[in-house]
Image (cartoon, rainbow, N blue to C red):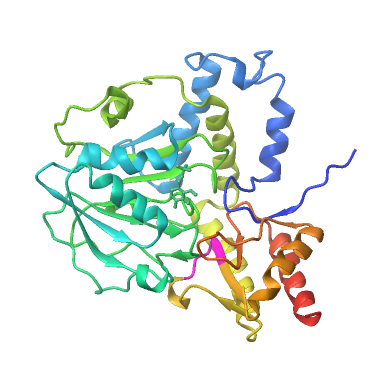
Amino acid sequence: MTTKRVHNFSAGPAILPLEVLKQAQAELLDFSNTGSSVMEISHRGKPYLAVHDQAIERLRRLTGVDDSWHVLFLQGGASTQFAMVPMNFLPQDGKATYLNTGEWSKKAIKEARHFGHVEVPFTSESSNFNRVPKPGEYQVDPSSAYLHFTSNNTIFGTEFPEEPESNGVPLVCDASSDFLSRPLDMERYGLIYAGAQKNLGPSGLAIVMIKEEFLKTQVKRDIPTILNYSTHVETMFNTPPTFTVYIVNLVLGWLEQQGGLTGIQTFNEEKAAKLYAEIDRDDFYRGTAEIESRSLMNVTFRLADEGFEDRFVKEAEAAGLDALKGHRNVGGIRASIYNACPMESVDALISFMQHFRRNS
Ligand SMILES: Cc1ncc(COP(=O)(O)O)c(C=O)c1O
């Protein structure tokens, strides 16, 4: 029996490596000679803990950090991190700095304001978030507890080309839609978090990496136990989403086979360059993000004649190209080409774009 798989451009939950899905399928009924699936065994038993620990080790290895970095697998998605970060690190009489580059940044800012003073020295809201800041475009007060930024803006198709300036203040990053798509300058970070469902696995998990030195700056505040990072650093406090962690661990193994973060970066750059070249070829398509801010993960564009966009999405779907409709805040087309998106899918999209242009 052959299984029909589409060219999947979903923004998230998103495509996973086929090798990973096949391994999960092969191990589904009997994981590691347990006679059970990984979903059916204790999270405190050896077979599951081996998976959990391997995923932590792989995350440290891929990002090039040692065990002074804590790796946590938390529930509540990246959205819970919007609240946990300021709850744990923004003093009531202190301040934190946030860069506002899209809807997700706005949500993070809203939560932070519950806990202390928030400074927002940059926003691109007036141009519908079509760019991230350029160096020198904003100032960070050195007394800020941290500088929060959204490294990739899933909805608007923009991405920081590199870590933003922070005047020596530790970076805190929502890396939900580009985590592990390229190397990171981990020295600059205090904390980095990402929902798993784009580059790393199924939904239901936020990966949080915290540097011990940053953890020491945690504020004294009376907060619920489960929302305190130290709780999770000290112990496996409650049942982690075991099946999701298992898939993430397989994806991390796959990522190592692709040459780690530098290997996957080269591949991601090739895919994005091809697609943007097609968009820029003439006026039929038009990228929505400023060129220097373009995302390697979410490629957003419009058709010169916006009236053709619905037809574009429908005909693409009929040709096996799935989930190309842009987010409702931007409209148009969005092709999400995360780590696991193969070159064949990008090539198929480009052929379709050429065909559509010829026939319109
Ligand atoms: C950049 C970014 N941050 C946060 C979120 C929210 O993640 P979750 O749904 O896991 O809370 C998303 C979801 O798409 C996202 O793209």
Residue 274 pos. (x, y %): 63, 73
**Image spot of residue 107 (x, y percent):** 36, 50
Q: Residue at x 47, y 57 (%)?
A: 182
- The residue positioned 14% from the left and 60% from the top of the image is 141
Residue occupying the far bottom of the picture: 282
Q: Which residues are magenta?
A: 294-299
Residue 123, by quadrant, is bottom left
Please state if 233 lies on the left or on the right of 317 as rendered: left
- The total of numbered circles placed on residues is 0
Which of 303 and 221 lies nearest the eye of the viewer? Answer: 303
Q: Quadrant of the C terminus?
A: bottom right
Q: Is residue 116 left or right of residue 171?
A: left
In the picture shown, does residue 168 fall above or below 200? below
* Among the 4 quarters of the image, the one containing residue 284: bottom right
Query: Magenta stretch containing residue 30, yes or no?
Result: no
| Furthest residue toward front | 307
**Image location of residue 180, percent across then percent down:** 48, 51
Query: Which quarter of the rendering shows the N terminus?
Result: top right
| Left or right: 129, with 118 as reference point | right
Given residues 212 and 274, the one toward you in this image is 274
* Image point (50%, 17%), residue name: 43
Main secondary structure of the magenta stretch? loop
In x, y percent, where is residue 253?
57, 40
Please name the residue shown 78% across and 48% down the image: 5
